[in-house]
Image (cartoon, rainbow, N blue to C red):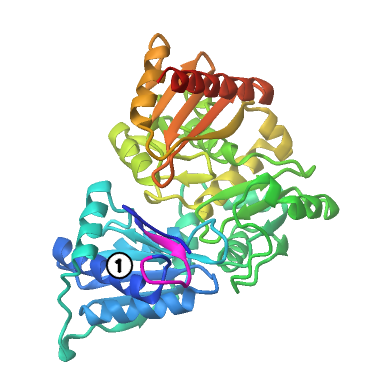
Amino acid sequence: MTLIKSISGIRGTIGGIAGNGLTPIDIVKFTAAYGSWVLTKTNIRKIVLGRDARISGEMVNNLVIGTLQGLGIEVIDLGLSTTPTVEIAVPMEKAGGGIILTASHNPKQWNALKLLNHKGEFISDAEGKELLDLAESASFAFAEVNNLGRVVLNDTYLQKHIDAVLALPLVDVAAIKAANFKIVIDCVNSTGGIFVPALLKALGVETVHELYCTPDGNFPHNPEPLPENLTEIAKVVQQKNADLGIVVDPDVDRLAFVCEDGSMFGEEYTLVAVADYVIKNTPGNTVSNLSSTRALRDVTEKAGGEYHAAAVGEVNVVNKMKETNAIIGGEGNGGIIYPESHYGRDALVGIGLFLTHLAKFGKSISLLRSSYPNYHISKNKITLTPEMDIDALLLKVQEKYKAQPHSTIDGLKIEFDSQWVHLRRSNTEPIIRIYSEAENENIAEALATKIITDIKEILKLN
């Protein structure tokens, strides 16, 4: 059993002993801390709640609702929803915050409480630490019987979210309809199975072949939208002679595409393609995290904009976007953040923008993919002893490569012309994660191997 307490919420496997898994006691404890924190920060007695379709969702939902009611907070319950839908709903409801019950791409035994501020954005590092401290102190004041919070069921936000996508100036419904796309979708039996077909219908897509769109939480495969988990949709796209495949994760904030020949468009290139379309029509700056592909920088600078890198984590990307006035940003995991809509990763917004881009491109999705710089990212890790001073080790690697352009805002990233390597320590294990990117797989792997060898040599000298 696993329980991970982080600045952005609480995540864990269902069951087990309190404190070692995501048990009812842990759910109540952290919900009470969050509700108390919202009251202290905003004095607003209203919180928006939504969940993905995983099996434990109803149980967790009931515990969260009861706890918030016990604090005297009104709960706007969206029911089966998506992370970006809750993010949109918080400011529309003038709520003090929002909770999404989802473990995102994690398997079905996991669930989590994702926590939002009154703007519908993820809480900051400092706010998360305040909340964790409050949870440990357990100094909660619950409401008396006449002041208990009420529950308002609200099923209008599916349509409100779709309407918000359709209202975006760069989403061209007429162009999408005219393209007459044939699309296969895989929604891993979560809430994408409700939202994605409804959006495609609203966009004028008449031919949609649905895979796993029953929102019962029985994920048919690992729900992370990586190539090794998308073999079935790749076959169906070819069998149905479809123009493309669309894949979302369980809470619909990550987006991946499959080309008409069954090849992967590449999760890293979801943001690259959408950003390319956006900045060609509304020039400006872009942001992604340090572990995302260099291709975004290439297309941004080609269009005359500035690219900026942020530390890994959605809240860090959002902060950098605000700081640099970026018009689009996100993460290489298929997360699109488009401030014209809201500051959160949103697969529905991404679908609207991407299909418009593809319709206006007028050629196949594989040809669109081939129009972008082609890079390969290699992901490795090196396991160290628990007593190892990882920060000191990274400093020695930094010293070795001090002549190269580098960044230390999140671990250590070293640039070698168009290639780079990014070293990040794990927050939960004695591990350094090593990401490297180059023009092809062999060079990327060789770069990672060189850095791993350097680390081993440094360790021998100690």
Q: How many marks?
A: 1
Tell me if residue 93 can be seen.
yes
**Along the line of sight, which residue is nearer the eye, 418 or 308?**
418
* Kind of residue indicated by mark 1: Phe
Tell me if residue 409 can be seen.
no
Query: Which residue does the numbered mark 1 point to in the structure image?
Result: 30
Q: Which residues are magenta?
A: 10-19
Q: Where is residue 426 drawn, in percent x and y?
A: 42, 41
**Along the line of sight, which residue is nearer the eye, 203 or 6?**
6
**Along the line of sight, which residue is nearer the eye, 282 or 59?**
59
Q: Where is residue 352 drawn, in percent x and y?
A: 55, 51
Residue 255, compared with residue 192, is above or below; it is above
Instruction: Identify the secondary structure beneath mark 1.
Output: helix
User: In the visual, does 254 lie left or right of 115?
Assistant: right
Residue 145 lies in what quarter of the image?
bottom left
User: In the visual, does 47 lie left or right of 290?
Assistant: left
Residue 286 lies in what quarter of the image?
top left
As for residue 13 lying within the magenta part, the answer is: yes
Residue drawn at 67 percent across, 26 percent down: 441
